[in-house]
Amino acid sequence: MGQGRAWIAALLLSGAPMLSGCGLADSHAPVPEFLRVKAPEPPIEAPPDIKQLVGAKLDSVFASGSQPTHVRVSAPLHDPRGLGWTACVRAELTSVIGKPLGTQTYRIFISDGVISDRRHIEADDNCLTETYEPL
């Protein structure tokens, strides 16, 4: 009976290195996803000062000649597309021919402290329900 226990112990010890490696595959290893070590999340940049950023770069948000007035901004939110931020900007605008366009709302995208993109909002955008503060 003593030899049987020694044989089982030897078998278990010889298989331990193989078993211990199962959970140590890095994030690029050709093994199933659930066996991979998770890659560390990249750090998220600090929230930008939206009022300062938009105030300094109105031309990045509104077309030249649109004469934005009563500019208001929402709080920044993490951009679901990446590591940057997104916010909503509203203003009273005028067309190139001087006709009032009324209140226009844009979603801006901020990356590395710079407005990288802006889009006129769609009907289902959450900018319609955001709280705004004047510049």
Image (cartoon, helix red, strand yellow):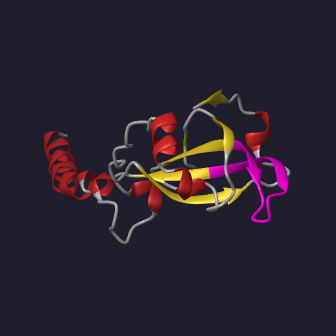
Which percent across, then down, holds residue 84?
46, 49
Residue nearest the observer in this picture, 27 or 121: 121
Name the residue at the front extreme.
98
Q: Is residue 81 visible?
A: no
Which percent across, then down, holds residue 91?
71, 43
Q: Quadrant of the N terminus?
A: top left
Q: Quadrant of the C terminus?
A: top right
The answer to whether 9 is drawn above or below residue 61 in the figure is above
**Residue 114 located left or right of residue 9:** right
Residue nearest the observer in this picture, 8 or 135: 135
Q: Which residues are magenta?
A: 90-107
The residue drawn where x is 27% and y is 54% is 24
Residue nearest the observer in this picture, 12 or 90: 90
Residue nearest the observer in this picture, 32 or 102: 102
Which percent across, then down, holds residue 67?
67, 51
Residue 103 covered by magenta stretch:
yes
